[in-house]
């Protein structure tokens, strides 16, 4: 009877384990890549990763691609989606490396070319799912491979530490004076345009002021809660966040050109304009030659 009772307990325990929600992709595999190929300045050694680390990165992305367990806990899914977005962005850069900017690659954010949780999705779709959770701190965690992005954390996001990690990354982002400046003597905050692009995630202008005041380091943003405080938005540097100097010279004009050539409407407009220019040149030369023949014949 004792053995039968023990066997029943084992079966019950097994049933509980089988019924418990799973955890999805193993974050430790992504963390191993981050610790090896992301430096203290949050720059990525894409060249070294492409040469030596693709097996590890692709091993993690295979878990990202496979269907995740049903009933996965909210914070576990949230952490996994952040890790997935960042890892897929890094993999897309490595696929195209060397490249000065993610904006030099074809349709980097809207193309459905990535596998996540058994679906084929775009980076924008992963971001949209995270935005739907209504936690604006995710904007301090998603890294789009640009120099003006928040820092790529050298550890994976995990459910049990997610609140601490998101708060920490938000503070670190706002503490970077190249990306966000707080000037209380002028009543001015000059912050990342991410806060403008995703303004609705922060609520009203008052909501953004409250967010910045709450997360700015050392209380430097509290002046934003006072009447008359102003918020301005910086330019965004789309140069690659590479550990080397690659991407350092990527200018706004480079960005405009890349946006143009990767936009089908603009691209065909440019081709049409070039065609008109070439055709017009031949027409003009033909007229000149005809005029010259008429003059010589006279």
Image (cartoon, rainbow, N blue to C red):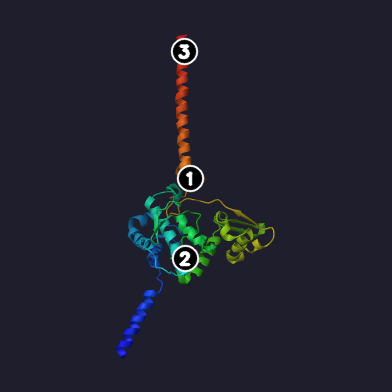
Is label 2 in a helix, a strand or a loop?
Answer: helix
Q: Nearer the viewer, residue 10 or 289?
A: 10
**Mark 1 highlights which residue?**
259
> Label 1 to label 3, Cα distance in Å?
48 Å
Q: Earlier in the sequence, mark 1 or mark 2?
A: 2
Q: Residues within 10 Å of mark 2 (few under 14, many from 20)?
A: many
Is label 1 in a helix, a strand or a loop?
Answer: helix
Which quarter of the rendering shows the N terminus?
bottom left
Q: Position of residue 275 (x, y in %)?
A: 45, 32
Say if residue 141 shows up in the picture: no
Image position of 75 with respect to 115: above or below: below
In the displayed structure image, the side of residue 217 where residue 238 appears, left or right: left
Q: Residue furthest bottom?
A: 1
Which numbered dot is residue 298? none
Q: Nearer the viewer, residue 205 or 11?
A: 11
Q: Position of residue 235 (x, y in %)?
A: 55, 50
Which numbered dot is residue 294? 3
Q: Position of residue 291 (x, y in %)?
A: 48, 16
**Mark 2 highlights which residue?**
78
Q: Earlier in the sequence, mark 3 or mark 2?
A: 2
> Label 1 to label 2, Cα distance in Å?
31 Å
Q: Residue at x 46, y 34 (%)?
A: 272
């Amino acid at each position: 009877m004792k053995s039968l009772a023990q066997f029943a307990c084992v079966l019950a325990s097994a049933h509980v384990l089988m019924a418990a929600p799973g955890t999805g992709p193993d974050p430790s595999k992504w963390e191993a890549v981050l610790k090896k190929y992301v430096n203290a300045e949050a720059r990525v050694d894409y060249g070294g990763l492409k040469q030596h680390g693709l097996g590890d990165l692709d091993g993690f992305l295979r878990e990202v691609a496979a269907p995740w367990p049903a009933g996965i806990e909210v914070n576990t899914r949230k952490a996994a989606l952040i890790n997935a977005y960042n890892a897929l962005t890094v993999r897309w850069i490595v696929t195209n490396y060397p490249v000065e900017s993610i904006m030099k690659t074809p349709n980097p954010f809207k193309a459905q070319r990535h596998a996540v949780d058994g679906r084929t999705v775009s980076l924008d779709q992963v971001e949209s799912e995270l935005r739907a959770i209504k936690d604006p701190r995710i904007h301090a965690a998603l890294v789009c491979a640009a120099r003006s992005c928040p820092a790529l954390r050298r550890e994976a996001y995990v459910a049990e530490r997610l609140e601490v990690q998101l708060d920490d990354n938000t503070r670190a982002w706002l503490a970077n004076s190249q990306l966000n400046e707080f000037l209380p003597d002028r009543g001015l905050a000059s912050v990342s345009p991410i806060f403008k692009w995703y303004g609705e995630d922060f609520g009203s202008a008052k909501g953004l002021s409250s967010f910045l005041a709450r997360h700015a380091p050392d209380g430097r943003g509290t002046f934003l809660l006072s009447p008359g405080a102003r918020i301005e938005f910086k330019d965004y540097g789309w140069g690659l966040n590479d550990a080397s100097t690659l991407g350092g010279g990527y200018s706004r004009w480079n960005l405009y050109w890349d946006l143009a050539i990767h936009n089908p409407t603009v691209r065909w407009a440019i081709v049409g304009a070039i065609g008109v220019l070439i055709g017009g040149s031949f027409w003009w030369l033909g007229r000149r030659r005809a005029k010259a023949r008429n003059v010589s014949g006279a």
